[in-house]
Image: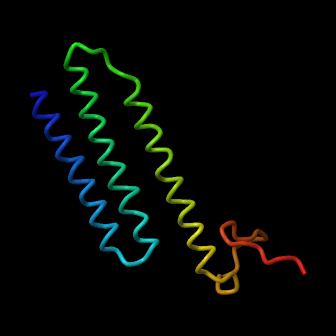
Amino acid sequence: MIETAISALLILGGLFGLIGSFGLLKLRDPMQRLHAPTKATTLGVGATLVAATVQLTGQTAPPSSAHLLILGFLFLTAPLTALYLARAHLHRTVLRNALPPPAGTGDWASTPKPPAS
């Protein structure tokens, strides 16, 4: 039963990695391309790490906290990387004058302010 679960997790992880790679190649817009590697590949690596943890726990080794640390680091850094890449894309392609005015008295946080004259 454990071997079946490990095999299923490894196949699932490989499929997510394949889908993420395919999406990275086939999607046209850079904003669309962000979702493929950050979402699908994160789930693929997560499933592979869970399979490795189940495999090692099923043997004589005690459960390792290293897998949980890797998984936590991956789940924290992948969305942040996508956020910063999206902001960099917005800064390079969207003109500030083309944006609608924000609600209230604030200003848009993701667009650079024009230099003071």
Where residue 110 appears, x then y in whole percent?
Answer: 65, 68
Q: Is residue 5 above or below residue 26?
A: above
User: Which residue: 72% across, 72% down?
Assistant: 112
Q: Is residue 42 left or right of residue 97?
A: left
Q: Is residue 86 left or right of residue 109?
A: left
Q: Quadrant of residue 115?
A: bottom right
Q: Quadrant of residue 75?
A: top left
Q: Is residue 36 above or below residue 113?
A: above
Nearest to the observer: residue 88 or residue 39: 88
Q: Is residue 62 left or right of residue 30?
A: left
Number of marks in picture? 0
User: Which residue: 21% across, 26% down?
Assistant: 55
Where residue 80 appears, x then y in whole percent?
Answer: 53, 53
User: Which residue: 24% across, 58% down?
Assistant: 18
**Most distant residue in the right direction:** 117
Q: Quadrant of residue 4?
A: top left
Q: Is residue 73 above or below residue 59?
A: below
The C terminus: image quadrant: bottom right
What is the image's colouring? rainbow
Where residue 82 appears, x then y in whole percent?
Answer: 50, 59
The N terminus: image quadrant: top left
